[in-house]
Amino acid sequence: MRVVFVHGACVRDGSWWWHRTAELLRERGMRSVAPALPSCGEAGLPGGRGGPGLAEDVAAVRQVLLDGDEPTVVVAHSYGGIITAEAAAGVGAVRHLVLISSYLPEVGQSLSDFGDGSPAPFLDVDSDAGTFGVRSGLLVDTFLQDCDPEIQAQAADHLARQSVQVTGQPVRAAAWHQVPSTYLVCAQDRGTPPRLQREFARRASSVVELDAGHHPFLSQPDTVRDLLLSL
C-alpha cells in the first residue's frame, strides 16, 4: 500500500507538512510521497497571473498516481481536496480517499464557490501580482494552535504565495463519486469552519471527527497514522 499526500493552499515543501505522519507510516513499512504543486511555486515556474493553476496541480498529482499500479490511498488536505477530486478520477490504483478538513467539490465547482465572496481575514491577496498567501502573523493562531512550539516555529518557513487563479478554476471530475472516501472533520479548526467540514463530510462514504486544529497530521500524527493503517 502506498500513500500519496496532497497538501493545501499557500504552502510549499509538502514533505515537511506531512513528515510526522509519514515517519510513523514508514516505521510500519508503508511508503508515502507528497507531490509538488506548481501553483504554489514548487515546480520552479513563475507564479501569479498567467502562471500555473489548478490544471497544473491536477496534472502533477495525477502523474504520481499513475506511476505504478500499487494500491494507493490519497490523503488530501484543505485545497488538496479540490485537486484530488479531479486528479484521482479514473485511476485504478486509487483505492481510498482520505479528506482532512478538505473541500469536496462536485464537477464544475471551484474553491471560490465555498466562500462568501471576500477573502478570509487570514489571507493576504495581491491583486496586481495575482497571488495570495497566509498572513504570517495569523498562521499559528488560525492553523497551528494545537501543535507544539517546534512545529509552530518552523511552519512560517514553509509558506508560499500561490496563484490566485486556482480559486476560480472548476474541477472537471469528482473522484469521490467512484472511490470510497473517509472525511476527517477537525472540530477545533479555526481556518475551515467545522460547520462547513461537516457539510462536505455528508458527501463522503464515512466520517471521523477529531478534536484537532487544521493540521492533525502534525498535532496528532499517531491518530492519523492509525486511521490510514485501518484502511
Image: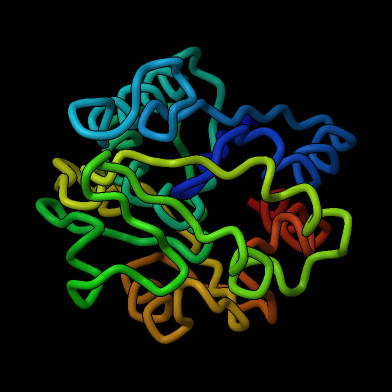
Q: At x 25% / y 57%, what residue is drawn?
A: 111
Relative to residue 189, is residue 103 depicted above or below? above
Relative to residue 219, is residue 5 depicted above or below? above
Q: Residue furthest bottom?
A: 195
Is residue 133 toward the left or the right of residue 21 in the image?
Answer: left
Q: What is the x, y in percent for residue 91?
A: 34, 28
Q: Nearer the viewer, residue 41 or 55?
A: 41
The number of callouts visible is 0
Q: Nearer the viewer, residue 47 or 200?
A: 47
Q: What is the image's colouring?
A: rainbow
Q: Quadrant of the N terminus?
A: top right
Q: What is the x, y in percent for residue 131?
A: 32, 43
Is residue 68 toward the left or the right of residue 208 in the image?
Answer: left
Q: At x 37% / y 80%, what residue is drawn?
A: 196
Relative to residue 228, is residue 44 depicted above or below? above
Q: Residue furthest left?
A: 108
Q: At x 62% / y 65%, what residue is drawn?
A: 137
Q: What is the x, y in percent for residue 168?
A: 16, 51
Is residue 77 toward the left or the right of residue 217 in the image?
Answer: left
Q: What is the x, y in percent for residue 81?
A: 39, 51
Q: Quadrant of residue 78?
A: bottom left
Q: Nearer the viewer, residue 116 or 107?
A: 116
Q: At x 16% / y 45%, what residue is drawn?
A: 169
Is residue 119 toward the left or the right of residue 184 in the image?
Answer: left
Q: Quadrant of residue 105?
A: bottom left
